[in-house]
Image (cartoon, helix red, strand yellow):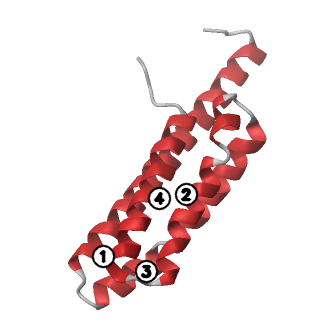
Amino acid sequence: MNSIKPYQANLINFTAMVFIGLWSYTSTHLNHALIIPAIGILLSAFHKQMKAGENLAKNIVIIITLLNFISLFMPLERVISTNDLMGIIRMSLLILINLFALIVYYLSFKASKTNQLNKIEGNDL
């Protein structure tokens, strides 16, 4: 079964962050809306290293994605309180895409650890 790789999840995540963040900026003209595309560009800088399988790049991307995921709830509260339907949609999309990426990273980490344990025990499947 072909499963999505962490570098592919990162590609989806940073692309969505850039486009949705720019959409948010053009809709609101608030400068802080540019933070999300900036984080997306930062994540894109690690794409090549993630594709090559570098663990340090994976760990940095996981930390940035997790912090970003947590930080997205405050803007979501703000758009909910102002009844901004498009803002709610944009923020919900960002949260869901970040959650998707975090789940892919977790499953990849779990599979990697399972493979390492199987090799150590001599149960290489």
When asked about the image quadrant of residue 21, the answer is bottom left
Mark 3 / mark 2, whichever is N-terminal: 2
Contact (Cβ within 8 Å) of mark 1 with mark 3 = yes
When asked about the image quadrant of residue 110, the answer is top right
Mark toward the viewer: 4 or 1: 4
Write down the residue under mark 4.
18
The residue closer to the viewer here, 99 or 35, is: 35
Contact (Cβ within 8 Å) of mark 3 with mark 4 = no
Residue 75's disc number? 3
Contact (Cβ within 8 Å) of mark 4 with mark 2 = yes
The amino acid on which the numbered mark 1 sits, given as a three-letter code, is Gly
Please tell me how crowded label 3 is: few (under 14), some (14-19), or many (20+) other residues with Cα within 10 Å.
Answer: some
The amino acid on which the numbered mark 2 sits, given as a three-letter code, is Gly
Mark 4 / mark 2, whichever is N-terminal: 4
The residue sitting at 67% across, 44% down in the picture is 46
Distance from the alpha carbon under mark 4 to that under mark 2: 5 Å
Write down the residue under mark 1.
87
The amino acid on which the numbered mark 3 sits, given as a three-letter code, is Pro
Contact (Cβ within 8 Å) of mark 1 with mark 2 = no
Mark toward the viewer: 3 or 4: 4
Mark toward the viewer: 1 or 3: 1
Residue 40's disc number? 2
Mark toward the viewer: 3 or 2: 2
Residue 60 coordinates in the image, percent (x, y): 71, 51
Contact (Cβ within 8 Å) of mark 3 with mark 2 = no
Distance from the alpha carbon under mark 4 to that under mark 1: 15 Å
The residue sitting at 75% across, 34% down in the picture is 54
Please tell me how crowded label 1 is: few (under 14), some (14-19), or many (20+) other residues with Cα within 10 Å.
Answer: many
The residue sitting at 46% across, 58% down in the picture is 17
Element under disc 3: helix
Element under disc 2: helix
